[in-house]
Each structure stands twice: as structure tokens, then as C-alpha cells.
Amino acid sequence: MIKFTRVFKAYPKGDLALKDVSFHLRKGEFAFLTGHSGAGKSTVLSLIHAERKPTEGEVRVSGFNTTSMPRREIPKLRRRLGIVFQDFRLLEDRTAEENVAFALEATGARSNTIGPKVVRVLTQVGLAGKAKAFPKELSGGERQRVAIARALVNDPFVLLADEPTGNLDQRATRGIFKLLEDVNASGTAVLMATHNLDLVKNSPYRSIELEHGEIVFDSVVDADQEAAR
């Protein structure tokens, strides 16, 4: 579903953000992307949603080859992805329901379908009662729930989460992570970049660790290699 094959990414000054990265995220899988700041986590996510293209290698996402796809095809790919950021990126002058509806409006959804879809995802994230609230009236955890609802409203096949709990306290972190688990249990794959190693260690999911742009540990690959010995 998401497949990186010997991917390199160099930036204008020549620094390599990714070096020979290969991995395969399968349909419905939950995986953590870990590593220190600058390890390459955000670069991996940006290549998946075609914000950037690799310098070398191939990135395939649900049948799309993002390495060679024409610019006009990028919106089609992004409609199939959900993306959540650490800083929420909500429109401050719009209510929770208006923030979620905006994601549908931007993709040209029929107006008569928007309302029911917004209600569905706000209910899914536990915020049906806060639909009319503006971001400033919500806690950090609630704002992230709105951001997740916005990411889910187009029924993506994968949810990309870039440090989604980075600005939250421990209680809100647990709530958001439980929500991501529920999203995954419903069939949506989740790729979550995080610094929270306690969360990773206490969870049964796959962990892919980056260091200086290289994969230095992949729990699935390492487990397979160990079993083969």
C-alpha cells in the first residue's frame, strides 16, 4: 500500500535527509516512525503525500508512483490520505464543524453530503457536542480530535500523523492514541511519527526507527530475521 524502495532525499545544500530507505506499510497496518528531531520522519511523511519527491528511488502509495506522477494527479492521491499535525492547523475563525466541512468543500464534495459526513466524524472522535465551538474554546486534546475528524472525513485508506501528541499532556495523549487505535481497528492504516518512546514501548505495533536519514531498526523485519535463524 505504501512502499519505499531505496529512497534517497537530498536538499539543495546537498545534505541527505534520507539514505537508502526501504519499507512496506501494508493495508490496515499500524506503525510508529521514530527517531530524534531531524532523523527524517517528517521527510518520509512529506514524500508519501507528494509534498516532495525523492532524489533517487521509488515511492508508491496506493497505486500512485509519487516519484514520477504529474502534478495534476497529486490532488487525487491526497484525497485518499488523511494527515494530522502536531500544531493542529485549524482555521481559528471557523467552528469545529466548519473546519471539518472545509476538507470536504476543498475536494468538491456535493453540498448535500457534507453535513451528514461532518456529524459522523465528529461523533466518531467524541466531539458531537462541540460542533459549534471555535478552536480557542477547545482544549489541546479537543483541537487534535477536530484535526483527526478533518483527516478522516474523506474516508482515507491511511492516516499520517506527524507528532500528533507532541503538544498534549499525558492524559490527552492517552485519549488521542486510543482514538488512533480505534481508527486503525476500523480498517484505516496509521503511520504515526512520534518522539514518545514510552508510547511505542508499551504498544504492540510495528516500530520503524530512523537515525540520520537511515532505517536502523524495523521491528517487523528484525523479528522476521530472528525467526529465520
Image (cartoon, grey):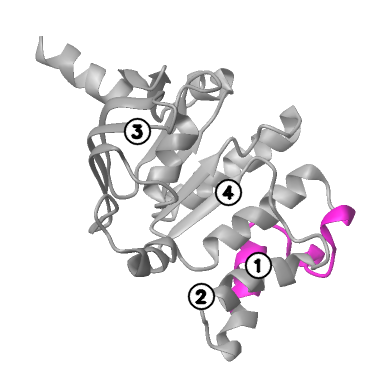
Residue 163 percent location from the top left of the image: 59, 35
197 displayed left or right of 71: right
Q: Give amino acid for label 1.
A: Val
Query: Does 72 appear above or below 217?
Result: below
Residue 31: which numbered mark, if any? Answer: none
Please tell me how many numbered marks the rendered image carries.
4
Q: Give amino acid for label 2.
A: Thr
In the displayed image of the protein, which residue is found farthest to the front?
Answer: 13
Q: Residues within 10 Å of mark 3 (few under 14, many from 20)?
A: many
**CB under 8 Å between discs 1 and 2:** no
Labels 1 and 4: the sequence-earlier one: 4
Assess whether residue 124 is covered by the magenta stretch.
Answer: yes
Residue 2 percent location from the top left of the image: 29, 46
Q: Residues within 10 Å of mark 4 (few under 14, many from 20)?
A: many
Residue occupied by mark 3? 9
Residue occupied by mark 2? 107
Q: Main secondary structure of the magenta part?
A: helix
> How far separated are the C-alphas under marks 1 and 2?
12 Å
Give the residue drawn at x 49%, y 37%: 192
